[in-house]
Image: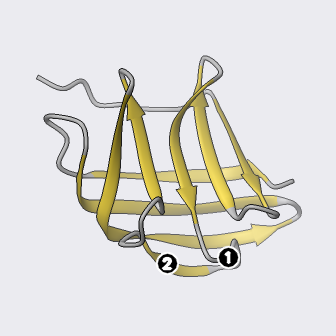
Amino acid sequence: GVTPFTKADEAVANTQYKTIIAKNGGATVVEMVLPSLATGTYSLATQYAFTYVKDGGHWEATAGSVTITKNENNKISGNYEATAGAGVSGITSMKGTFTDVPVN
């Protein structure tokens, strides 16, 4: 079976590249590339919009959305649900939340 990933130990949002990156042990596990980091809902159907890295493989979302519910005081919060994708055997969808991720 596939062990679900539960929590990153580090996350950062970057305004220049409009990315949200979650890391575990210094290695990227989730990367979201969005059109904006402003509050709102964004599609994950765009290539490279959502990538999950597991055991050297890359799972890319082909459907779903990320919603940024708060972007203030250099911190960003929201949630995501990637409802379809491909690239890593056994993974069919992902969802989660991010809270007070530092923006730089």
* Residue under pointer 2: 42
Q: Amino acid at mark 1?
A: Ser
Mark 2 surroundings within 10 Å by alpha-carbon count, few (fewer than 14), some (14 through 19), many (20 or more): some
Marks 2 and 1: in contact by CB < 8 Å? Answer: yes
Q: Quadrant of the N terminus?
A: top left
In the displayed orientation, state which residue is furthest to the bottom. Answer: 40
Residue 9 falls left or right of residue 71:
left
Q: How is the image coloured?
A: secondary structure
Query: x%, y% of residue 60?
Result: 35, 52
Query: x%, y% of residue 87?
Result: 25, 42
* Residue under pointer 1: 36
The structure residue drawn at horizontal position 42% and vertical position 72%, both measured from the top left corner, is 46
The structure residue drawn at horizontal position 82% and vertical position 63%, both measured from the top left corner, is 16
Residue 49 falls left or right of residue 38:
left
Q: Earlier in the sequence, mark 1 or mark 2?
A: 1
- Residue 54, disc: none
Image quarter of residue 83: bottom left
Foreground pick, 41 / 60: 60
The structure residue drawn at horizontal position 56% and vertical position 63%, both measured from the top left corner, is 78
Residue 1 falls left or right of residue 46:
left
The structure residue drawn at horizontal position 65% and vertical position 21%, both measured from the top left corner, is 26
The relative height of residue 56 versus residue 76 in the rendered view (above or below) is above
In the displayed orientation, state which residue is furthest to the top. Answer: 25
The relative height of residue 63 versus residue 89 in the rendered view (above or below) is below
Q: Label 1, secondary structure: give it.
A: loop
Query: x%, y% of residue 25?
Result: 60, 17
Query: x%, y% of residue 27?
Result: 59, 24
Image quarter of residue 5: top left
Q: Amino acid at mark 2?
A: Tyr
The relative height of residue 34 versus residue 7 in the rendered view (above or below) is below
